[in-house]
Amino acid sequence: MSSQTSPLSLGTDSLSRLLMRYALPAIIAQVAASLYNIIDSIFIGQGVGPLAISGLALTMPMMNLTAAFGAMIGAGSAALTSIRLGQGNKAAAERILGNVVLLNVLLGVVLMAFGLCYLDELLYFFGASDQTLPYAREYMEIILYGNVITHLYHGLNCMLRVAGYPNKAMNITILAVILNAILDAIFILWWDWGIAGSAWATVIAQLVAVVVQWIHFSDVKSFLRFRSEAFRLRWEIIKNIITVGMAPFMIQSCACVVVILVNNTLGEYGGDLSIGAYGIANRVAFLFTMVVMGFTMGMQPIVGYNYGARAYDRVLKTLWMTVGWSVATTTLGFLICEIFPYQVVHIFVSEDGSGSATELIEASARGLRILVLMLPLVGFNIVAGNLFQHIGKPKRAILLSVSRQMLFLVPLIIFLPRHLGADGVWYSIPIADFASTLLAALLLFQQIRKFKKNPSSEVSI
């Protein structure tokens, strides 16, 4: 197991160099991962049609729900593995690895069976109409059959990172994204498989990634590797994984609730194409927030080490440096989307002379400009929330993440469309971003005062 940086250097090296050294692989991996949905949307929009884009958007709640369980296992197992390795207990870490595989297979099968049994009912609940249901069902059936593969892919990639192979985890993610794009082109544009081609491309790309991961963990030279005795479910390990991973599970679950509400409200006030427009706009904004998440992942080891060492000046310098780069990223996204909304939307949908394509382009461009109104503030908001997580204050981190969706966004989506129609859904998003940023600023500056006025009260985690 090798590392580019000695842990001691986190307290002495240049903060800008450290942040870029840790953040760059994370940014590349996060952007590559977010390209999955963007690539699928582009090929479906260009090769299948506007209603297929809406059908794809309807699958987001189910994808978010399965991702919530995946995040719970991934985050929980990664944290526990790091602790066991820090304690020098490699055997315990390998038992966690074995349980990650078994737990992902078990949950993947359960979610697959449940989803397939009630697929139509779920999709109607998520906002499907008779026109969009066939597209959503065709796509989601294949994704559900590959659900175990998806869970294993994300779970094993988390284990690769904590086992000391972050670059390998990044490369596997990039491999899967490139393969997904190639297969999308073959299946949709050349073989005319329609929306099913996109689903098959996703599953096959992830299967190849799982094979590469499996080979790695089967290699006797790997720092952590599969051992037959580790493949036995242990309740203590499972309980700890679920407990530690509950925060990201709650965040993803709230996101699922929000998307269901958005889809149903847009379907009621704007129709099927409004749902597709939201799917496009949300994916574009998501790309820029993933870059910010990469910065916060790079910030994590620097902030954690210096917080533990009570070097609060370095914690604050790293925080503000990360805020600066993150706000610059989201501001760039804001400018691109406000100045070139039609050019951005045309990446997903082309004018084909049909009224539905023109309507989708107009709705997407208008919605995109509204959705990103507060995007520059989102960069600050994400960094502030992650700081609390990195210094061992998960309650505040969860509060900031959940409040944006459940405390602010849900009531706005329920109230505003009654007066503004479909526009009320779109305007709810920047208003919720603004309100949650005010809350983040309040909590953050309270924490900064503690750093400066009474540093002895802070306990190293």
Image (cartoon, grey):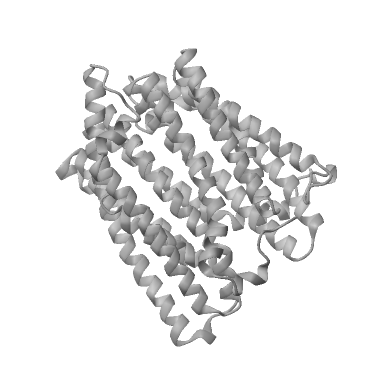
In the rendered image of this protein, does residue 113 appear above or below residue 27? above
- Picture mark count: 0
Q: Which percent across, then down, holds residue 449?
A: 41, 81
Q: Which percent across, then down, holds residue 418?
A: 18, 43
Q: Which percent across, then down, holds residue 37?
A: 45, 35
**Residue visible at 49% across and 35% down in the picture:** 36
- Nearest the camera: 164 or 397? 164
**Residue visible at 30% across and 23% down in the picture:** 350
**Residue visible at 60% across and 58% down in the picture:** 244
Q: Quadrant of residue 144?
A: top right
- Nearest the camera: 78 or 255? 78
Position of 387 compared to 416: left or right? right
- Nearest the camera: 131 or 445? 445
Give the quarter of the figure containing the N terminus: bottom right
Position of 158 compared to 59: left or right? right
In the rendered image of this protein, does residue 129 appear above or below residue 20? above
**Seen from this angle, which residue lies furthest left?**
419
In the rendered image of this protein, does residue 397 appear above or below residue 106? below
Residue 442 visible in this rendered orientation of the protein? yes
Q: Which percent across, then down, holds residue 118?
A: 49, 27
